[in-house]
Amino acid sequence: MNSLRPELLELTPQALTALSNAGFVKRSLKELENGNVPEISHENDALIATFSDGVRTQLANGQALKEAQCSCGANGMCRHRVMLVLSYQRLCATTQSTEKEEEWDPAIWLEELATLPDATRKRAQALVAKGITIELFCTPGEIPSARLPMSDVRFYSRSSIRFARCDCIEGTLCEHVVLAVQAFVQAKAQQAELTHLIWQMRSEHVTSSNDPFANDEGNACRQYVQQLSQALWLGGISQPLIHYEAAFSRAQQAAERCNWRWVSESLRQLRASVDAFHARASHYHAGECLRQLAALNSRLNCAQEMARRDSIGEVPPVPWRTVVGSGIAGEAKLDHLRLVSLGMRCWQDIEHYGLRIWFTDPDTGSILHLSRSWPRSEQENSPAATRRLFSFQAGALAGGQIVSQAAKRSADGELLLATRNRLSSVVPLSPDAGKC
């Protein structure tokens, strides 16, 4: 090899699985083990793999894996692209020196980020203006990653930003990748050897009030939440629903007018717990309901304290906008993903029966869930495990893994699948399903 491509040498099977899919990686490894090794060459600053059947795959310098050109005719990703990387890694394995891993410097990507479309950079600036907080992970020997309120970004290569992957619908070089890089650059400037840090993105152009309750909408939301909380603390949740129906409605509408996502979600969850108590639901837990009620006022008190610290020039641990979920989208479209089932819980009350299935994304560690309920009169003929969700049987979902190219995630972690054009499928769990 005349020129090394360090970004390709950094791609582990885990990274290739995230950038393509598990099927392509497994098949590619099997074909290489069986001797179907392509010829690797360089031409015009591009890496070329020529296969025995005449297929030719070309990956130019600076291209993402899905941008590689392949003569196989596949739309998008294919196994030939994966085999190009794996073959190149094997070819370089004997010549690659065992040098100490260089310290990662994401600042090298700032110039490239500045060339992204204006729309992408404006979306990133809009998120910064809301005071977004990003959780950063940079443990030695592991993949650097960033967790945003509705997205997760992973940097599979420390040499090329083209191999950064976000689980949003864009997949790569989106506003979330921009923010993740900027957060790492700013954080490393103050803490060079960080391994885990929660970093607040601050905008110099934010002119809005630092007090979340300075305007009429914010103040009204706090008052309505306090009235609801007081009614529940004094009267208990066993009182007739009519006693606090109006209080719940006023608080919920006020939170939605403020666009405070986490406040409105907290109210929704508390209301669901109260309703579950009155319906004698099997999944009702008194401790959980108590926690939700206590956390409701605590969230607003925390937002007030974070705003106070900010107003006196002290950097708060978390910006108040993040505490209340200011401007957080109700749902986000996801890129190609694989979810492994963690199990299912069935429940019933006096009128309905239902289920909830939990899933985890092995790439990001995120937890999602599917929830459904039906009239209890249908339970005898249609048990929960036999019901269908998005055209899939619940039992199969609970004991399998989902591969989807058309999924959405709501703010509370609810998973929404599209079934059109067979964009989602369910396969049985395997012993290594949880591995990346």
Image: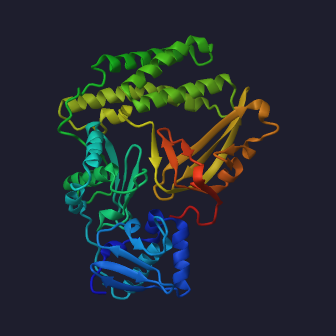
Residue 343, percent across and down?
64, 50
Residue 414, percent across and down?
54, 41
Q: Quadrant of the N terminus?
A: bottom left
Q: Nearer the viewer, residue 405 or 280?
A: 405
Q: Tally the numbered discs.
A: 0
Quarter holding residue 23: bottom right
Question: What scheme was used to colour the molecule?
Answer: rainbow
- Examine the rendering and report whether any part of residue 382 can be seen: yes
Above or below, 204 against 21 in this view is above
**Residue name at image x 45 percent, y 28 percent:** 264
Q: Nearer the viewer, residue 75 or 295?
A: 75
Residue 269, percent across and down?
53, 30
Instruction: Answer with left or right where residue 86 lies relative to residue 189.
Output: right
Above or below, 326 against 408 in this view is above
**Residue name at image x 43 percent, y 53 percent:** 167
Q: Nearer the viewer, residue 354 or 76?
A: 76
Above or below, 341 against 300 in this view is below
Residue 286, percent across and down?
60, 29
- Examine the rendering and report whether any part of residue 200 can be seen: no
**Residue name at image x 35 percent, y 85 percent:** 41
Q: Residue furthest right?
A: 381
Q: Residue furthest top?
A: 243
Above or below, 280 against 121 in this view is above
